[in-house]
Image: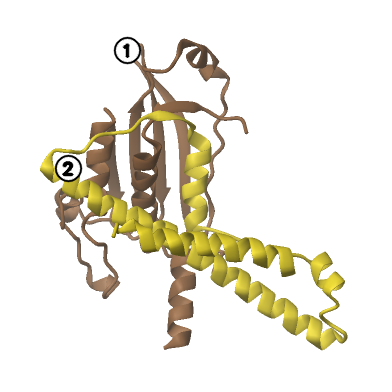
Chain colours: A brown, B yellow
């Protein structure tokens, strides 16, 4: 498989991605969830940007300061008992910081959220660095609107309600 | 007992069930070979059950991976608080990792 080889902690990055995606899938009821990978160059430093954008319910401005807090769960009347565990984004931010990266979250209430992870690429072997420009990153996101049956959270809820 | 031990067993059981399932009824060819259906009705019923089973296997399998990741988060959180957290770097293909994560939530 062609792709960009990075030197990082694959387990922690996976845990981080699963936390971010789990939020997106939980709080997006129509529209899209899109992942994009990009290489960003700033003052001779290359970094990789993994962005997860969704068209979910978004986060109120007044709640934005809480999103990275431990147990800083945001509640919303619209959601009923649907909420996070209060750990995901907090521990995700710590992983990224330990990997010398950065994580940002932007959101518009009612429109969607986008989370970006930036990881430094400077510690790559030079051979890989030379090949960087040649990579073309496909966007992995797909429309989820027509997939009533495909996503895990929906499938679980359906099955659960059928069983009880 | 390690937190992860029982969950690893569940995860590997699902992997085993999945490959056994694919071996037995994974595709049309296998089903024909097994001669499982003599009438169109039994074929339809078989296909319906096969699709459902496939769904539940994927659901169980994916959920066990997600739960394991959650347990790892909690273990890491306590390491971070004790100051014993350390990263473990290696080389890997980024796109494959991202795709793998996405597929755990969104599948055919």
The one of B70 and A102 positioned closer to us in this rendering: B70
Residue shown at 62%/69% (left/top)? B54
Tag 1 subunit: A
Residue A13 at least partly seen? yes
The total of numbered circles placed on residues is 2
> Does A10 appear above or below B77?
above
> Does A16 appear above or below B3?
above
Residue shown at 49%/56% (left/top)? B104
| Quarter of the image with the N terminus of chain A in it | top right
- On screen, residue A28 versus residue B60, left or right, reads left
> Does B72 appear above or below B38?
above
**Residue ID for mark 1:** A43
> Does A125 appear above or below B85?
above
Residue B69, horizontal then vertical, whole percent: 36, 53
Question: Which element carries disc 2, helix, strand or loop?
Answer: helix
Residue shown at 49%/50% (left/top)? B102
**Residue ID for mark 2:** B80
Q: Nearer the viewer, mark 1 or mark 2?
A: 2
- Checking the image for residue A138, the label placed there is none
The one of A115 and B5 positioned closer to us in this rendering: B5
- On screen, residue B73 versus residue A148, left or right, reads left
């Amino acid at each position: 498989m062609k792709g960009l080889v990075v030197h990082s902690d694959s387990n922690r990055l996976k845990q981080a991605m699963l936390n971010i995606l789990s939020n997106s899938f939980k709080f997006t009821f129509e529209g899209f969830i899109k992942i994009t990978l990009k290489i960003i160059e700033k003052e001779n430093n290359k970094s990789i940007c993994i962005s997860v954008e969704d068209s979910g319910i978004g986060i109120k401005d007044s709640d934005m300061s809480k999103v990275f807090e431990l147990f800083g769960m945001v509640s919303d009347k619209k959601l009923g008992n649907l909420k996070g565990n209060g750990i995901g984004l907090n521990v995700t931010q710590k992983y990224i910081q330990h990997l010398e990266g950065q994580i940002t979250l932007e959101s518009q209430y009612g429109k969607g959220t986008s989370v970006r992870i930036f990881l430094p690429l400077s510690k790559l072997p030079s051979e890989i660095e030379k090949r960087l420009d040649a990579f073309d990153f496909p966007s992995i996101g797909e429309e989820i609107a027509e997939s009533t049956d495909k996503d895990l959270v929906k499938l679980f809820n359906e099955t659960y309600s059928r069983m009880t | 007992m390690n937190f992860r031990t029982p969950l690893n067993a569940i995860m590997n059981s699902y992997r085993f069930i999945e490959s056994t399932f694919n071996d037995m009824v994974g595709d049309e060819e296998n089903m024909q070979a097994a001669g499982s259906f003599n009438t169109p009705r039994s074929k339809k019923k078989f296909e319906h059950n096969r699709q459902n089973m496939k769904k539940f296997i994927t659901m169980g399998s994916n959920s066990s991976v997600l739960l394991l990741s959650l347990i790892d988060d909690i273990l890491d959180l306590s390491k971070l608080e004790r100051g014993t957290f350390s990263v473990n770097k290696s080389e890997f293909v980024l796109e494959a990792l991202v795709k793998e994560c996405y597929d755990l939530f969104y599948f055919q």
